[in-house]
Image (spheres, helix red, strand yellow):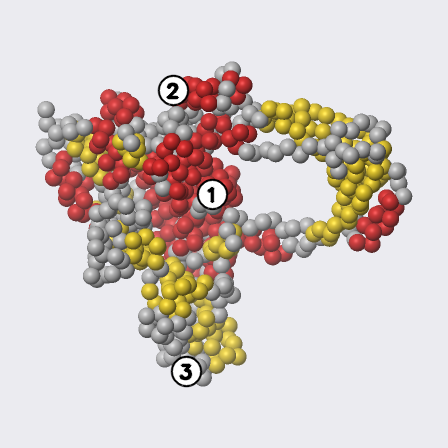
Amino acid sequence: MGKRVVIVESPTKAKTINKFLGPKYVVRSSMGHVRDLPERKLAVDVEKDFAPEYRIIPSRKEVVKALKEVVKGAEEVYLAPDKDREGEAIAWHLSKALDIPEEKLRRVIFNEITPEAIRKAFEHTIPIDMNKVNAQQARRILDRLVGYQISPLLWKKVTKGLSAGRVQSVAVRILVEREKEIQVFVPQEYWEIDARLVPKGSDKTVFTAKLWKKEEEEIKVAKEAEARALVEALKKERFTIEVVKKELRQNNPPPPFITSQLQQQAATQLGFVTKKTMRIAQELYEGVELKEGPVGLITYMRTDSYHISQEALKASGKLILEKYGKDYLPPKPNFYPSRKGAQEAHEAIRPTFVELVPEEVKDYLTKEQYKLYELIWKRFVASQMNPIQYEITDVTISAGPYKFRAKGRVITFPGHNILTRSMEGEPLPKMQEGEELKLLELTPSQHFTEPPPRYTEATLVKALERNGIGRPSTYAIIISTIQDRGYVRKEDKTMHPTELGILVTEKLIQHFPRILDVEFTSSMEEQLDRIEEAKADWVGILKDFYTPFKVDLEKAMKEMKSEKGGSEETNILCELCKSPMVVRWGKAGKFLGCSAFPKCKFTKDLSTDKRPVEVTQQSCEKCGSPMVVKRGPTGSFLACSAYPKCRNTKSLPTGVKCPEEGCGGELVVRRSKQGRRFFGCSNYPRCNYVTNKLPQESTKKEAPVADLKA
């Protein structure tokens, strides 16, 4: 029998699968996509049914050349990228780039990287799903049509280097609209009055009740004088328990994680940014070296389905019974319906082997991997537990015509709370109706209504999901892209649109209202889903989109107001030629430029997007001054604090040592000529090590890669 070749996306995944398959198979990595639309032109023929012009990605030419040699003469070629649209498209592009004969091609998909799952997948190969490919292709072409035709318009009307994205621009709009709500918000003053009380003639627990009503009307106190007058009136009243109402309730366990909820909880509980969460989840999915060998610890992490396999449900039930006892195990497994349109062929994110409790694998994981695995493991096990049982006590207290209210909660059975820690008890002392209370203190407190909060990464993901914008695999990319473009900055963990982000958003809303419409963007996601389900033709969807878009584009070319030319003059004079300075726009926001440009090119910072200067412990090699963190159009970097006297700059260090033996350098963040981020050795050019993925404290040596795409 001839050789059997397996191609996956990543080297880690290849290494794990290779150990499962054994010597009969040759496993190789494609390093992701090998074909795409070329960067420097539209590469979509709108006159010929939007035919895409695919090319081998320049950084993948050597990879493709090597893969062609490997598949030459192979009896069977198994394409095993991930099971989502992107993975299906990678498989299809590989089949075309490598000229794999149809009779030799096998498509392999699996939800987890375990020996049993891999064995079953290779026993049941399938054809490439062209509906998934066409859905991905339609998205890619849509994004290209928007980005490559609106971006040049922004260069012409605002400043060079700007870009627009079909989905990302809508995400920025959500942030801009929230910012405007905050700016126009007028806080309203209000007062609350709390009473500290204790049953008379008793050493029982002191508790607090809140002023609620006067007779049957809820009290609203707007001013301090009203609050003080109420306090004086209440001091004269007799406090008595009027009603004690008790009610048994239960709190059902949360469902296992889907992608959006994992991103939200990792941000809230672990402080992980969305991109970091997905990177670590990918590592757990692709395989971790345990004592018994490499194994994927979690199932596929890009999913919107709550479905759980029967085998996993049985395993979780057995673990709960043995580890926590029969009281925690429901009579039948808990079921969670997925949202409309979810891909039920997928599973929720869960541990591949639930019996691998986090503590047992802790020594094999990085600190971050352990935290995320523990979060996923606890959520999955909790999802199959009994509810929390608790008793609510609602007490109404009369004080003359006034009524106070106090609420208490006692957990009677912890249920899933032993893992989720989602509820705490707040007991009240035992009380009886008609019982008199002793007033210890009345406390008036001033409050103000608050504006809606700015979005965090977690709440933005929730908003994107709620509005149907993007899909599980795109949330992290959306959030990182809008920050990299300079339209959004993160401050104190909240997302702030920049001046530039607001300006560009307002222009796009005015001239492309359809593309910037949240509902339209959501409906376009539904159309892509219909393509995947073979219910819509991808070319027809593109035609329906492009016809009105082309009209809007031509109109915007003529009517969009230009921000160039520096029409807003100032009374500041140029430090070089004494001409008046004018306000202009750049990728970093507003700045002052000399009105004598291009004869005089002097500029001065005017951005109101100021952030505190972050001073580092590093000293400038040229003048000895402290280095500070600054941000430019391509990201953060270190600059000398003595600027403009000293203009020394250097790349931002990562704290990770270079994996090359004997080098002693440190990996730093760099950018390619195309603006793509990668990591390179600080000892360059003596050391040429580069990688697009930061190694884990360099315990393993990672081979340099040609691809510099972040």
- In the image, taking residue 361 as reference, residue 257 lies left or right, namely right
**Mark 1 or mark 2, earlier in chain:** 1
Q: Report the mark closest to the observer, 1 or 2.
A: 1
Q: Residues within 10 Å of mark 3 (few under 14, many from 20)?
A: few
- Depth check: give the residue in front, 601 or 511: 601
Calculate the distance from the C-alpha at mark 1 to the C-alpha at mark 2. Answer: 30 Å
Q: Report the mark closest to the observer, 2 or 3.
A: 2
Labelled disc at residue 156? none
Calculate the distance from the C-alpha at mark 2 to the C-alpha at mark 3. Answer: 75 Å
Q: Which residue is mark 1?
A: 270
- Depth check: give the residue in front, 700 or 232: 700
Is residue 200 at all visible to an observer of this figure? yes
Find numbered disc 1 in the image and state the secondary structure of the residue it sits on: helix
Image position of 567 with respect to 167: above or below: below
Calculate the distance from the C-alpha at mark 3 to the C-alpha at mark 1. Answer: 51 Å
**Mark 3 or mark 1, earlier in chain:** 1
